[in-house]
Image (cartoon, rainbow, N blue to C red):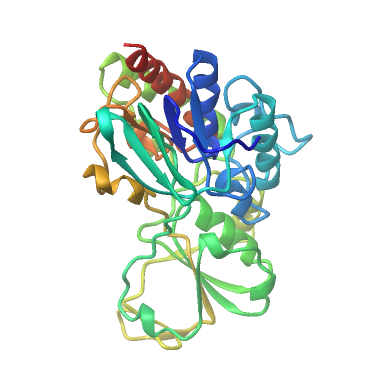
Amino acid sequence: MTVQLRDADVIVVGGGQAGLAVGYYLRRAGVDFLILDDQPAPGGAWQHMWPSLRLFSPASYSSLAGWMMPPTGDDRFPDAAHVVDYLTRYEKRYDLPVVRPIRVSSVSLGAGGRFAVHTDAGSAASRGVVSATGTWSRPHVPAVPGRDTFRGRQLHTVDYDGPEPFAGQRVVVVGGGNSGAQILAELTTVAETLWITQRPPRFLPDDVDGRVLFQLASRRFAARRDGVDDPGSGIRGLGDIVMVPPVREARDRGSLVAEPPPSAFTPTGLEWPNGRPTDVDAVVWCTGFRPALDHLEPLGLRGRIATTGAAGTRSADVPGLYLVGYGDWTGPASATLVGAARTARDTVRELADAIVS
């Protein structure tokens, strides 16, 4: 649904999974709101993921509130296209008031203590703002000596579309997380690969997927709510990489062997600490993201913004501002579908109470 930009009690910046989760609960609470999304179509960052990307858990454990993600047959791990379809249908199902495409340039405090949300289509005022812009638009590439001198192709996870352009090449994949492992597994079928990680990759047991991670995240959420010690070490102790089928198959082929970082890049490849050179054709940086929060700088907020409240999403410094879906610092597992739904629920409960009062 497309609506005109207008003032509202709450404006949600970002129409991906976190923004839709917040919208669902705002609708249930009877709060007047708008969702502003800079994408041309529903689906958030998922519409830009590489086609073979897999979720870490079954559809039933990857759902927003109100409507479970439809199953995908025999495949335990839905792909990115399935998630886009789900989010598109979810938005329509609950008739969420999304304005798109519209880019929010900044949020400031206006007259009467209300927020002024400035966009490329004008400005709107609100009593509360929920920032749900995620991280996909801010890919991070570390400063490695010589990186700018490398003459081969360099791309980040956000630029990766599939293995075909790398057929017959020698490709370096940098990063020891799930994205790095999944992209590496796919590239090993068409290219000679080299995997570089800061520390040895830690694979989860084959029978552990997002369902177990969800249970552990639930314990962390309950611990935060009840003011007891965070049991987060339970998650860290299990490992980092979920063994989705392509990763498991690559491991069984012996293709998931990682090397420590080189000392520098050269125009033609890598140089190792012992001086040995290695020529490569391309580098894929699977080195993560940073929160997309530039629009909040006029509020005096930069970097990792301090949050508080029951859900851990309320700005500690700007009343009426909430941040949802950026990772554990805005609620355990809040960058996942089910985690975003859970933090959205408690965020809206707190936000609605503040608006009513």
Q: Examine the rendered structure and indicate whether residue 297 appears above or below residue 114.
A: below
Residue 28 place in picture, x, y as percent: 54, 15
Residue 206 at x, y percent in the picture: 58, 40
Visible residue check, residue 208? no
Relative horizontal placement of residue 47, taking residue 8 as reference (left or right):
right
Which is more toward the observer, 112 or 27? 112
Of residues 70 and 144, the one drawn nearer to the viewer in this rendering = 70
- In percent of width and height, residue 104 lies at 43, 47
Where does residue 92 sit, x and y in percent of width and height?
68, 30
When the figure is inspected, residue 198 is found, relative to residue 207, above or below; the finding is below
Closer-to-camera residue (301/277): 301
Q: Is residue 143 above or below residue 319?
A: below
Give the quadrant of the N terminus.
top right
The residue shown at (64%, 32%) is: 91
317 displayed left or right of 352 = left
Q: Where is the C terminus found, in terms of image quarters? A: top left
Q: Kindly indicate the quadrant of the structure image that contains residue 231.
A: top left
Q: Is residue 26 visible?
A: yes
Camera-nearest residue between 151 and 31: 31
Residue sitting at the far right: 73
Residue occupying the point 54% across, 19% down: 27
How many marks the image carries: the answer is 0
Q: Quadrant of residue 233?
A: top left
